[in-house]
Amino acid sequence: MLTKKILLVMALNLFICGVCYADMKIAIVNNSEKIRPETNINYNHCPKIRLFSAKNEYESFQLVLENTHNEDVSAKLKISDLFSENGNIFDCANITIYSVKYVDVTKFSSNPGKWPDPLVKITDNNVSIEKKTRIVLWFTVYVPSYVSKGIYKGNIAVEFEYGESENIEIELAVWDFSLSETPALKTAFALWPGFIAKRHNVPLESKELKAITEIYWENMLEHKVSNLNYIYPEIENVRGNAKIDFSDFDKKMEYYIGKGITSFNIFWSGIPYTYGEQKPSEIPGDFENYIFVKQVLQKTEQHLKKRGWLEKGYIYLTDEPDVKYFNILKNTLSQINSISPEIKRLVTIGYAASTTSGANGYEYKKLAGYVDIWVIHTDRIDQQFLEERQQKGDEIWWYVTCGTRRPYANFWAIDYTTVENRILFWQAFKYKAQGLLYWCINYWNKDVWNNPVAYADCNGEGSLIYWGKSGPVNSVRWEIIRDGIEDYEYLDILSRKIHELEALNSYGEYSHLLAEAKRIAEISLVSNMTDFTDNLSELLKIRIQIGNIIAEISDIVREYDQKD
């Protein structure tokens, strides 16, 4: 029988710990452990550890309930508010519970079997554990920006149907700094409405599709990811002239800017999008309505500049262009620049453009001067060239696809370790990548609930989320991506805090703290793109150190400003 109270205090550096009783076993696992059916769970006594978080940050943990009864057992989960010593309240409504589901990885994997990925939201806090099995619950804790710093304590009561109840104590330490509403790492992840229409059985171009697509957009923003294509203004061709109404566009864009989107595609220019071996559109050669296209670009540039949104916009004209069309592409990109010089031109560099050309290196270098945002495969990086382009004002983004596999990191692989999914964001910061692009998060040409190979021979490629009855279903990988984006933010804040402290260190009083901050900022977890830590505890330990240093420097700067 379950008769004793459980003390389980959570932290980022907590692995697997818990307690074991005669009929039920309970354990807490951190959010970065993928718990497979065969994962060994340690149900022995758990040490006292805390969960650390900045404000405007999401942190997670997992609860394992194992039923050794010979019959099924139901339980009710009750989460209390958390209270600090100062009497501040952390609302339990900011804690969401999900049931971890599994997908069968049967092909194209060095480690086949059941892998945890879909996270199905539990709305009534009721769970059922079949006899001789275990379930895994995923708890996501959101710390709003208004929460005061401090250590908050509360509990989760697990009330079993046969009358026993167990309390799991929670301790949440909130640092006195906040992550930005707009992430430091720019993103452009494509959501394809056609697959939403297919899986939700609604017509294309319908109000129903529009409404449910916006639910998916909201989910992306909750995960700090920007969609590739959002909204567009109303454009009318009046006798060859462009008449553009931005009124509805502005209202919606104000909302999404406020929610933290980092970028958006100007996909309404009228220039046809091309990809791969398709010949890029030529300007003005391919356009009878060249004047119309020119006016659309010019008026869009003027309006976005007036609204202060131009920096977030870009025109994504062609995807992975073939080298044989580089001259045409250069001409088109040059024409766009002459029409609207402040609209950035984004080009994804595929493998066809990443072949080497003698001593000159990768073919894509030939596009220098014509591209403003370079999107490079992580296994085709010419770091020296790309840093030179950054010095000239270009942006460098990365992307991963089915071609980017071990020994490289990626975030799409269901059957990769959490470190392999997450370390990419640390690499991005270390090697000065400013953004990440991903081709599709919902490539649901197959039932990915039952077959994770939706594209090529990769488990999870193109399908980072799942569909549910009324909207998106999160995944373990989707949560890890948000963690990685927040990791990048931590590193960005640390970098800025180092500069602030250097300005105050004229007498050397902060030299030790400054040296420690700089040491961590070197990101020793990453040696290069294929050599990085596989030690999860090391990554999580360093993340806590970063948070502590940011908080300490922030206090020093705040105290200095008050004296000034």
Image (tube, rainbow, N blue to C red):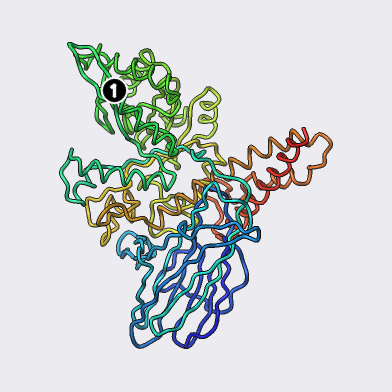
Residue 439 seen by the camera: yes
Q: Which one is nearer the viewer's eye here, 485 or 140?
A: 140
Q: Residue furthest left?
A: 203
Q: Secondary structure at mark 1?
A: loop
Q: Which one is nearer the viewer's eye here, 102 or 58?
A: 58
Give the left or right position of residue 46, taking residue 300 as reference. right
Can you say whether 546 is above or below 312 in the image? Answer: below
- Residue at 43% x, 29% y is 312
Rendering coords of residue 279 (x, y %): 25, 26
- Residue at 41% x, 58% y is 476
Rendering coords of residue 285 (x, y %): 23, 14
* Residue named by callout 1: 269
Give the left or right position of residue 561, taking residue 524 as reference. right
Rendering coords of residue 311 (x, y %): 45, 26
Dot 1: few (<14), some (14–19), or many (≥20) neighbours within 10 Å?
A: some
Quadrant of the frame with the C terminus: top right
**Amino acid type at mark 1:** Ser
Rendering coords of residue 480 (x, y %): 45, 54
Can you say whether 19 is above or below 88 in the image? Answer: below
Give the left or right position of residue 372, taking residue 549 as reference. left
- Residue at 51% x, 86% y is 3
Q: Residue furthest front?
A: 87
Q: Quarter of the image holding residue 286?
A: top left
Can you say whether 242 is above or below 97 in the image? Answer: above
Q: Quarter of the image holding residue 517?
A: top right
Q: Quarter of the image holding residue 209?
A: top left
Residue 398 seen by the camera: no
